[in-house]
Amino acid sequence: MESRGETGISVIGPGTLRSIHRKLMDWFRGSRRDYPWRQTHNWFHLVIAELMLRRTRSDQVAAVYERFVKKYKNARAASKDPEGVQETIRSLGLNWRNEQIQETIQYLSHRYGNRRKLSPDEDLKSTPGVGDYCNAMLRSRLFQEPEPAIDSNVARIYCRLLDVEFHPEMRRKAWLKQLARDYMDTAVQSKELNDPFEINLALLDLAALVCKPGIPKCMECPIRNHCKTGLSRNSRIS
């Protein structure tokens, strides 16, 4: 490992990144979580799924999402039935998020109507509620663009790999964004599964199932031999 620029934080070389990707995707093939929004290419449904998932567990969202997509195939249909939308998503709680979903639906309906497809030159980041993370997930799915989706859970993985103290705002750090970019670029060029959307999902599932907040399951981690935090914890235990 080498230090990058003024941060003094060690970064991970391409050989190690390739090894991490190979081991992670081998694990992901047998451990991936399956949710309905992972099977769709409906851009509107993907946006709604990402909004529903904010601060809410995936298992809680699944049933609500399925009811929503059965009723509303596009933004225009949903915009015409705000009371029905509210009733459908009410059980998720978080009033601010439910209000945001309604605002997003109205915006998307006004801008895109009932369009089934978007073109790559259309940027959804101007959409209320769609930030860098959501936009990266959408573009990696819809257009196969190698965009790393970095939320606080994924940032936790990168911090632990380098044994850097983690806090949620680390996802905004330039060095971490660059490391995520390095990993994505290496991964999509590999012989392993190199679908950018699947790569993003693999990191999310690792964070949810193994590299958890609090006490991670280091002995179950497929990339533990490349993780400074994991190696340190294991040495203390032994």
Image (spheres, helix red, strand yellow):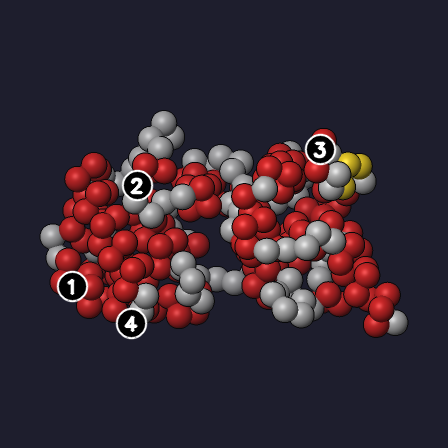
Q: Quadrant of residue 93?
A: bottom left
Residue at left 20%, top 61%? 85
Judging by the rendered image, the residue that carries numbered circle 4 is: 91
Residue type, numbered disc 2: Thr
Check disc 2: other Cα within 10 Å, few if <14, some if 14-19, many if 20+.
some
Q: How far apart are labels 3 and 4 at the CA level? A: 47 Å
Using the image as rendered, state which of residue 117 and residue 186 is in the foreground: 186
Q: How far apart are labels 4 and 2 at the CA level? A: 24 Å
Residue type, numbered disc 4: Ser
Residue type, numbered disc 1: Gly
Q: Earlier in the sequence, mark 1 or mark 4?
A: 1
Q: Earlier in the sequence, mark 3 or mark 4?
A: 3
Q: Is residue 56 left or right of residue 100?
A: right
Q: How far apart are labels 1 and 3 at the CA level? A: 53 Å
SS category of the residue bearing label 4: helix
Residue at left 49%, top 35%? 145
SS category of the residue bearing label 1: helix
Q: Earlier in the sequence, mark 1 or mark 2?
A: 1
Q: Residue reaching furthest top?
A: 121
Residue at left 71%, top 52%? 164
SS category of the residue bearing label 2: loop
Is there CB contact under 8 Å for labels 1 and 3? no
User: Which-is-in-front pick, marks 1 and 2?
Assistant: 2
* Residue 104: % across, % down: 25, 48
Q: Residue reaching furthest front?
A: 6
* Residue 204: % across, % down: 55, 56
Q: Is residue 189 visible?
A: yes
* Residue 56: % across, % down: 41, 65
Is there CB contact under 8 Å for labels 1 and 4? no
The N terminus, quarter of image:
top right
Residue at left 51%, top 45%? 149
